[in-house]
Image: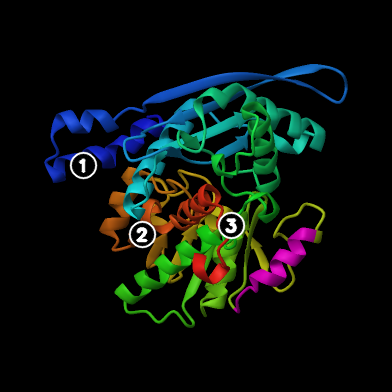
């Protein structure tokens, strides 16, 4: 079963529970538009390589499509469609005037020079420019894309339009119209949701134990802000492996270590022992934060999850069949469309500031 097909299982359950008019339901079961593009890039060795990119606009019923652009070797249309659908749901839950969108390019960014990466980024925008804009479809960062890449995208789109267009994209550097508070926004939302879930379970946040899967933007900020809130981070993972310490891990010191380690990995951090990613998901803790890829908690491993709460920092980390198993084991799951909505919420604030030429303080944003 493909990812998009899986994503329709909870949708169909919700449609049934709400007794939604089948005519209305039909509108949200498929995306409004999917686009596949091919981007030629002159490589540093003089050869030309053609990359495949995608953009999906799932819904524009409530406003412009909104969603990130990811660069990864496993990107495909099925994934992009699913992520766009989840963005529609997330924006609706957050009460934002957006529909869902998503984009991606099939590429291993580790194999590109900075010049090649910039050429690819500008080429992608050239191909999708007729279909995006501040009132049509608003991209943002996602996996392996960042503020610098958003800046290249904005610059290229502004060239095409012949005018400065900061509102067409969010997640930019402050110097290019970005918003204070955006970098940590998704992690802040995840931790806020977890603290509320701890209250439901009558567990005090101070001293509660947590495990973080993934140490990219979302995972690292989730770990840092959980630490600031008094939770004890006992395990963290990245693509290279995982580390564990019963005494707790300081995420700020870990970030410093990762920045200077040869592999830029959490492995080898002083005072921790190495474990596998599979081990990490089975650690007994008050909160498990899956902040990596989709489909991490499945039918095969859900019964082994020993956390009291799962607070989803990633998009779709828990499969529908795993959800049923977790429910049977009394694991409280805070779903992604609620837990990780902080990023798109602050993206909305950035968009509003761009449209009206405001600049809000971090206190106003938070």
- Give the residue displayed 57% in from the left and 54% down from the top: 277
Front disc: 3 or 2: 3
Residue 358, picture quadrant: bottom right
State yes or no: residue 251 in magenta: yes
Per the model, the C-alpha gap separating discs 1 and 2 is 17 Å
Per the model, the C-alpha gap separating discs 3 and 2 is 27 Å
- Tell me if residue 263 comes above or below residue 31 in the rendering: below
Q: Are marks 1 and 3 in contact (CB under 8 Å)?
A: no
Q: Is residue 109 visible?
A: yes
Q: Regarding mark 3 in the picture, which secondary structure is present there?
A: loop
Q: Where does residue 298 sit, x and y in percent of width and height?
A: 41, 46
Give the crowd class for mark 3: few <14, some 14-19, many >=20 residues within 10 Å: many
Check disc 3 and report the residue beneath it. 179
Give the crowd class for mark 1: few <14, some 14-19, many >=20 residues within 10 Å: few
Q: Decide which of tag 3 and tag 2 comes sooner along the chain.
A: 3
Q: Where does residue 137 sit, x and y in percent of width and height?
A: 47, 35
Check disc 2 and report the residue beneath it. 334
State yes or no: residue 337 in magenta: no
Relative to 144, 93 lies left or right:
left
Q: Where does residue 128 sit, x and y in percent of width and height?
A: 56, 25
Relative to 164, 332 lies left or right:
left
What secondary structure is the stretch in magenta mostly built from?
A: helix
Check disc 1 and report the residue beneath it. 13
Q: Which residues are magenta?
A: 247-259
Q: Is residue 305 visible?
A: no
């Amino acid at each position: 079963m493909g990812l998009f097909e899986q994503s329709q299982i909870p949708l169909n359950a919700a449609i049934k529970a709400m007794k939604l008019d089948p005519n209305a339901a039909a509108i949200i079961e498929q995306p409004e538009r999917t686009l596949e593009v091919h981007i030629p890039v002159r490589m540093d060795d003089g050869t030309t390589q053609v990359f495949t990119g995608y953009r999906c606009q799932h819904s524009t019923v409530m406003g412009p499509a909104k969603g990130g652009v990811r660069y990864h070797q496993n990107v495909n249309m099925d994934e992009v469609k699913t992520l766009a659908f989840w963005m529609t749901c997330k924006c609706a839950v957050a009460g934002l005037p957006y529909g869902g969108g998503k984009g991606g390019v099939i590429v291993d960014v580790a194999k590109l020079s900075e010049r090649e990466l910039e050429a690819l980024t500008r080429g992608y925008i050239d191909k999708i420019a007729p279909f995006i804009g501040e009132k049509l479809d608003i991209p943002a960062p996602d996996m392996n894309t960042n503020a610098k890449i958003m800046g290249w995208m904005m610059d290229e789109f502004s060239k095409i339009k012949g005018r400065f267009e900061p509102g067409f994209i969010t997640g930019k550097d402050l110097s290019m119209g970005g918003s204070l508070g955006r970098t940590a926004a998704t992690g802040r939302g995840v931790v806020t949701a977890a603290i509320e879930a701890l209250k439901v379970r009558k567990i005090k946040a101070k001293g509660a134990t947590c495990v973080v899967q993934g140490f990219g933007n979302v995972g690292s900020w989730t770990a840092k802000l959980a630490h600031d809130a008094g939770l004890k981070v006992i395990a963290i993972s990245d693509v290279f492996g995982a580390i564990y310490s019963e005494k707790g891990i300081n995420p700020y010191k870990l970030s410093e270590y990762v920045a200077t380690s040869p592999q830029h990995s959490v492995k080898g951090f002083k005072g921790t022992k190495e474990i596998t990613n599979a081990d990490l998901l089975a650690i007994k803790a008050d909160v498990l934060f899956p902040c990596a890829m989709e489909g991490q908690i499945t039918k095969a491993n859900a019964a082994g999850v020993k956390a009291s709460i799962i607070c989803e920092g990633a998009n779709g980390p828990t499969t529908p069949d795993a959800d049923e198993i977790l429910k049977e084991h009394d694991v409280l799951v805070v779903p992604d469309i609620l837990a990780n909505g902080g990023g798109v919420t602050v993206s909305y604030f950035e968009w509003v500031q761009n449209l009206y030429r405001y600049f809000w303080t971090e206190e106003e944003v938070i």
